[in-house]
Every structure is written in C-alpha cells, then in structure tokens.
Amino acid sequence: MAERPNGGSGAASADAPVAELVQRATEQISRLVRDELTMARAEMTAKGKRAGVGAGLLGGGGLLGLLAGGTAVATVVLALALALALALAVVMPDAVAALIVTVILAIAAAIAAQRGRKQVSKAMPATPTATRDSVRADTEAIRGAATRRQP
C-alpha cells in the first residue's frame, strides 16, 4: 500500500478513512449546532419583538382607557352644569359631544387592549419552537443515516 501524507501505512491507512469520517461528522455536528443556535436566537428575537409590540398595545389601551375615564368625568361635569343651567339650551351639545368622545375612546381602548393581548399570546410560550422542531428533524436524519450505515 502507498504511504499516506500523515506518514502511516498499512493498518494506519485503513483507519484514516474512519478518522476522516469522524472528523467530518464532528465538523458537521458543530456547524449544525451553531446553525441551530443562530436560528434559536433569531426566533427568540422575533418573539421578543412581538411581545414588545403586544405590551406596547396593552399600555396604549390602558392609556386610552384612562383618557376615556377622564372624558367620562368631564361628561358628568358637563351634565351637572346642564342640570344647574336648565334655562340654557346651548349646554346640551357640549355634554353630548363629551359623551361621544368618551364612547370613541373606550372603543379604541378596547380594540388596542384586545390586539395587544393577542400579540402577547402569540409570543408565548417564549420557547424557540421552530428551532426545537428543526433539531428533532436533524436528530431523526442522523439516526436514519446511522441506521443505514450499519451492516
């Protein structure tokens, strides 16, 4: 048998392909793990962004709800002013306008809170499910390849 560049011959050259295969497998597994970690990081970043958007919408809904409460108080004030000034028919449109604004703000608060809750629920659980599924598929592929190679 011809000598290999590593200086071995005979039995050593028979072991060289196995060693080479082990080295390649090690490199491929290392690359696979790095790729899976990169994918997990990207997935977690996307879920974090989605949770952040959801939290922002929930906060916006809370703020709009607070504004709706303030407008409701203004409506009560205007209604009281109306009761005190029964003779003035001009006060009534102000009270109706304040009530309309209160209803609009309350509806906007409910919509923002509902959308925010959906965004937060989509981001949960905070596990990288796509990466987990990919790792499972990789594991099955490796097992299948190992099974096919056995004599």
Image (tube, rainbow, N blue to C red):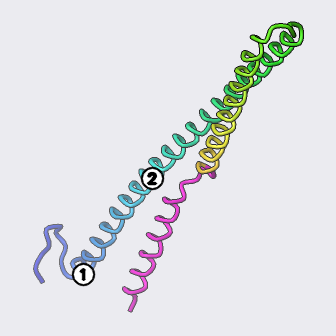
Label drawn at residue 14:
1
In front of the other: label 1 or label 2? 2
Q: Position of residue 112 (x, y in %)?
A: 63, 37
Q: Nearer the viewer, residue 36 or 51?
A: 51
Tell me the element at label 2: helix
Q: Position of residue 39 (x, y in %)?
A: 43, 53
Vertical side of 145 occupied by 114: above or below: above
Report the magenta residues as a range: 124-151
Vertical side of 1 occupied by 142: above or below: above
Task: Residue at 71%, 32% (x, y): give it.
Answer: 106
Three-letter amino acid code of the residue under disc 1: Ala
Task: Residue at 69%, 38% (x, y): give it.
Answer: 110
Circle 1 residues within 10 Å: few <14, some 14–19, many ≥20: few
**Residue at the spot of label 2:** 37
Q: Marks 1 and 2: CB-CB under 8 Å?
A: no
Vertical side of 121 occupied by 73: above or below: above
Image quarter (top left, top right, bottom left or bottom right) of the C terminus: bottom left
Circle 2 residues within 10 Å: few <14, some 14–19, many ≥20: some
In this rendering, would 63 be left or right of 87? left
Image quarter (top left, top right, bottom left or bottom right) of the N terminus: bottom left
Q: Position of residue 122 (x, y in %)?
A: 59, 51
Q: Nearer the viewer, residue 36 or 82?
A: 82
In this rendering, would 113 be left or right of 9? right
Tell me the element at label 1: helix
Three-letter amino acid code of the residue under disc 2: Leu
Q: Is residue 105 magenta?
A: no
Task: Residue at 86%, 7% (x, y): give it.
Answer: 85
* Residue found farthest to the bottom: 151
Tell me which corner region of the image, top left, top right, bottom left or bottom right, holds residue 149: bottom left
Vertical side of 101 occupied by 146: above or below: below
Could you tell me how many numbered marks the image carries?
Answer: 2
Q: Is residue 133 magenta?
A: yes
